[in-house]
Amino acid sequence: QKEVEQDPGPLSVPEGAIVSLNCTYSNSAFQYFMWYRQYSRKGPELLMYTYSSGNKEDGRFTAQVDKSSKYISLFIRDSQPSDSATYLCAMDGAGGGADGLTFGKGTHLIIQP
Amino acid sequence: KAGVTQTPRYLIKTRGQQVTLSCSPISGHRSVSWYQQTPGQGLQFLFEYFSETQRNKGNFPGRFSGRQFSNSRSEMNVSTLELGDSALYLCASSSGRGRLNEKLFFGSGTQLSVL
């Protein structure tokens, strides 16, 4: 079983829709949870950063963490074609910070104009 | 503020050769981490350097090595290249103040192709 599971997609939705992206994980020691956006031929860009369980909102983006279910989500409201990218979840803290970030393989999102 | 700069952007090498990749972190950042990204395995942690010392290492063979200079710039070296080393190599920088709660900022990567 992989430490972090993420549906690779592609996930295709019409412009303006609410997008829900998810990851599940197996290691309950993870404490920090991140979402990165990666455009083709670019490095990952940090979108959201949360600690432990709860919600965090930043503009059109909302990150949710449910540690009891080992499940994290990223919601994108009023989706735009420019949101089309690969979204990677990442986690930290299992090894006291010694193991680097553990990433999901990413979900490829397509926003249709 | 300039971001993380990686050079070169693209490299083509043949099996058995060695390669050196370079990374300049964000000004003021003292920690540099390296990751390998492939379609099959996703992003995997290679190693992290802080103040010229390797602070942590992932599960990669000894052919993968790195170093960091006093100005925080870092290089990564892969010796005796194999076909499976073809990947996007990403460098990330952070302030390095703590082991946890560090936000990583990535460069655009070096795309290495091994023929």
Image (cartoon, grey):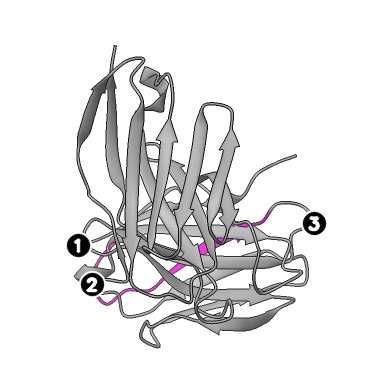
Give above or below for B87 relative to B98. Answer: above
Place of residue B4 in the rendered image (x, y in percent of width and height, measured from the top left): 62, 49
Does residue A69 show up? yes
Place of residue B39 in the rendered image (x, y in percent of width and height, measured from the top left): 23, 55
Residues behind callouts 1 and 2 on a single chain: yes
N-term mark: 3 or 2: 2
Q: Secondary structure at mark 2?
A: loop
At label 1, the amino acid type is Leu
Q: Secondary structure at mark 1?
A: loop
Seen at 58% across and 76% down, the residue is: A97
Quadrant where the image shows the N terminus of chain B: top right
Q: Which residue is mark 3?
A: B28
Q: Is residue A60 magenta?
A: no
Task: Determine the CA span between mark 1 and mark 3.
Answer: 38 Å
Does residue A44 show up? no
Q: Secondary structure at mark 3?
A: loop
Is there CB contact under 8 Å for labels 1 and 2? yes
Looking at the image, residue B14 sits to the left or right of residue A60; the answer is: left
Place of residue B17 in the rendered image (x, y in percent of width and height, measured from the top left): 32, 74
Span of residues in magenta: B12-25
At label 2, the amino acid type is Arg
Task: Determine the CA span between mark 3 and mark 2.
Answer: 37 Å
Looking at the image, residue A12 sits to the left or right of residue A39; the answer is: left
- Marking on residue B15: 2
* Disc 1 residue crowd, few under 14, some 14–19, many 20+, Cα 10 Å: some
Quadrant where the image shows the C terminus of chain B: bottom left
Subunit of label 2: B
B103 or B82, which is in the foreground? B103
Subunit of label 1: B
